[in-house]
Amino acid sequence: MLDISRKFTTLRTAVAQATVTVAPETLARVRRGDLPKGDPLTVARVAAIQAAKNTSQIIPYCHPLPLDYVGVEFTLGDETIVVTTTVKAIHKTGVEMEALTAASVAALTLYDMLKALDARLEIHGVRLLAKRGGKSDFVTSFATPPRAVVLVLSDSVAAGEKEDRSGRLICERLESHGLEVIDYRVIADDPEAIRHALIASADERQADLVLTTGGTGVGPRDHTPEAMAGVIEREIPGIAEAVRAFGQARTPYAMLARGKAGVRGRTILVNLPGSRRGVAESLDALFPAILHALKVVRGAPGHTPEAEEQGAA
């Protein structure tokens, strides 16, 4: 199976369809309930639900998923029975295979229950109609690349005693998401120096996004959150909470991070941990949602409270 441990959890939905072609006289008997094996639609619905729940046992590379909903609907035409399945799960990976498997097994069950009456049965048109909730649904595009500043806050790196790996990783990941890194610098764990660098990045450089790494723990030289508190004008607690929650699910030490996130003017500032692993996990938690936040801060059209409410519905 593919490694999905870096993915974030969202509501995933998939809708699939399969069509069974039947003779008109067979459909008439289905409508009347006049069949030797009982009601095929009821049995096919149960079979589809069971199939969706057991997809990972049938298709080798599918992940086992805790499904939240499986819906099965039948549309009877003149010579067809169309099966439509809807599957939902709050998880890290999509449920399109579960929906497709459910539709396929429902069609096979109908075939099995009707084959003694109809030699012209045919299953066709098994297809995915829609899927939502994956990473592509949260992609945000920009006419010009957002500008970013990366600040490495570390006494040892500033003194040349240690190589910076976390800040370089941030730069690489930002560029992979289409941002332009306009400044990268290393600063010692000095509260006033940190505060000055944050203000300069927002006010003078007018960066859209400022990411810091280091100084967020409980050590005697961890001053980053205190420096941030005096710089940001509006805190965004959800960002810091999401970073910690994502990390805590992967290491028990994430709860010790005290990083903050907030807005100064039209700049979003976020504190990330100092370790390379902590940075990598934090970036997994931030993107791509932070790109949406950059547009909102800039007052982009379409990001009104009403639009947000509709999008969350």
Image (spheres, grey):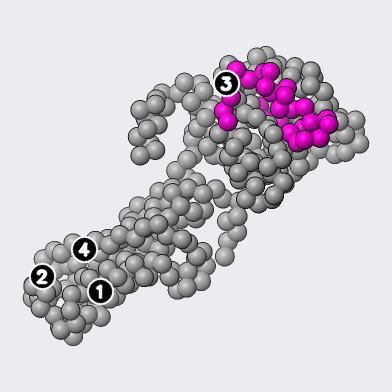
Q: Residues within 10 Å of mark 1 (few under 14, many from 20)?
A: some
Q: Residue 151: x and y, percent?
A: 74, 28
Per the image, is 210 magenta? Answer: yes
Q: Do the CB atoms of the residues marked 4 and 3 lie less than 8 Å apart?
A: no
Q: Residue at x 58, y 61 (%)?
A: 2
Q: To which residue does mark 1 refer?
A: 43
Amino acid type at image mark 1: Val
Per the image, is 290 magenta? Answer: no
- Disc number for residue 74: 4
> Which-is-in-front pick, marks 1 and 4?
1
Q: CA distance from mark 2 to mark 1?
A: 15 Å
Q: CA distance from mark 3 to mark 2?
A: 62 Å
Amino acid type at image mark 3: Arg
In the rendered image, the residue lying farthest to the top is 204
Q: Residue 56: x and y, percent?
A: 47, 69
Amino acid type at image mark 2: Arg
Query: Which label's residue is closer to the chain start, 3 or 1?
Result: 1
The answer to whether any part of residue 278 appears in the image is yes
Magenta region: which residues? 208-237
- Disc number for residue 234: 3
Secondary structure, mark 2, is helix
Q: CA distance from mark 2 to mark 4?
A: 12 Å
Query: Which label's residue is closer to the chain start, 3 or 2?
Result: 2
Task: Relative to 226, say whether 49 is above or below.
Answer: below
Q: Residues within 10 Å of mark 2 (few under 14, many from 20)?
A: few
Q: Nearer the viewer, residue 227 or 134?
A: 227
The answer to whether any part of residue 168 appears in the image is no
Q: Residues within 10 Å of mark 4 (few under 14, many from 20)?
A: some
